[in-house]
Image: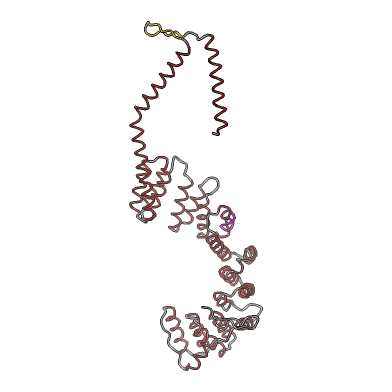
Amino acid sequence: MSVFRQLLLWLALAVLGALAWQLLAADPGQVFVRFHGVDYSTNVPIAVGLLLLAMAAVWLLAHLLLMPFRAWRRLRDRRARTQLADGLLALHEGRWERAARLLERGAEAARTLRLPALLAAAQARDAHGEPAESERLLQAATTGDAVPPVVALARAERLLRQGRADDALAQLDAIAGTLPPRALVVRCEALLAVGRAAEAWGLLGALRRTRALAPDALAALELRLAAAALREADDARVLADRWDGLPPSLRQTPDAVAAYAQRAVALGLEDAAAEAVEQALCSDWSETLALLYGQIPRGREGSRLTRAEAWLRTHPASPGLLVTLGRLCREESLWGKAEDYLHRAIAQGAGAEGWEELGHCFAAQGDEQRARLCYANALRAGRAETAVELPGRGLRERIQDLAVPEERDEHGLPRLPLP
């Protein structure tokens, strides 16, 4: 209360006291009390004073009588807060059993902190591998027939960790009203797990408004949902609508482009898949997409070898592109070029993909011995073992495979190698 308001209050009380004194000074009145045959007589001011004094005495006596109980209650609350604090620290340190024991004791003693204490204790039981005990604590946190939203959220998170996404969604559906921010994240993950990424995509706006995730985590979730929604497209029209509905920044990310291209190939849209990969590679180079480009079947537009060889001038040491060039040459029966590209790819670190494709190349020519050796090297590369050299490859050929032409920028200046 401000000083001005206090001044007004005291002035009003003074005015009321003056008015009461004027009324009582002219006629103080008479008060008669008869108790057990004895008459007591006094005026009104004294009677009011005696009444206030008696009330003060009764209040003081009650205060003195209740003082031990208040002290015991304060001690219990202090002990409960200490147990809750120690339990939360134990939960943070990973001492699950100690955390659950302290938090349960604190929940029994501190009624006002009962719900958060039981939720933390249930989390500790879950982390300790005791789902039955965790459910018992969550059941104890439920008051009556209504399930608190935080309890339903805790159950949904546990069910999602157990791989029961449908049951997790059922728990979240039981929450009345607007979902809490954390529940939106859990719902997105559950919808993603049951193959309903397009529905989860519609929750991204609410997630941005509530700021339930950090910007980097939200961007990663958005990319996962976009890729999953593209893979779940039932037909070409749905796939095209979802692809066109993505933000331009997402349409250039390797994961989204790869998801679109793979689904487009499955739906018979090879040319659309190749076009999307080409646009992404022209915008920002990706080894994943360079390797995927060669895996797209030939469409109505014919060979894509010329376009891939044009990229080789700016990315001569790309193992993914070299494997793609070897695969495209093999499809057109250009055996010499295919072998040269694949040997270069292996020398630049293509690994199992390069050896496997080289094996396909030799098998298509009927050279079973070298094909088997290449397939064996692919297995060795997958196990991080040393590959066996192919017969007929001398030192000069191996040096040529390792040599990389000088890269220059658009101004003709040499590019410095990356550290």
**Magenta region, mostly helix, strand or loop?**
helix
Instruction: Indicate yes or no whether the magenta region holds residue 202.
Output: yes
Q: Nearer the viewer, residue 379 or 278?
A: 278
**On screen, 264 above or below 304?**
above
Q: Residue at the location (48% across, 56% down)?
A: 165
Q: Which residues are magenta?
A: 200-206
Instruction: Indicate yes or no whether the magenta region holds residue 392.
Output: no
**Visible residue check, residue 79:** yes
Q: Residue at the location (54% across, 26% down)?
A: 10
99 on left or right of 310: left
**On screen, 313 above or below 193?**
below
Location of the N terminus (image quadrant): top right
Q: Residue at the location (46% across, 54% down)?
A: 157
136 on left or right of 409: left
Q: Residue at the location (54% across, 30% down)?
A: 6
Model colouring: secondary structure
Q: Quadrant of residue 221?
A: bottom right
36 on left or right of 231: left
Q: Nearer the viewer, residue 15 or 338?
A: 15
* Residue 66 point in image, percent of width and height: 35, 29
289 on left or right of 352: right
* Residue 134 point in image, percent of width and height: 38, 50
* Residue 228 point in image, percent of width and height: 55, 64
Q: How many marks?
A: 0
**Visible residue check, residue 125:** no
* Residue 154 point in image, percent of width and height: 45, 51
**On screen, 228 above or below 337?**
above
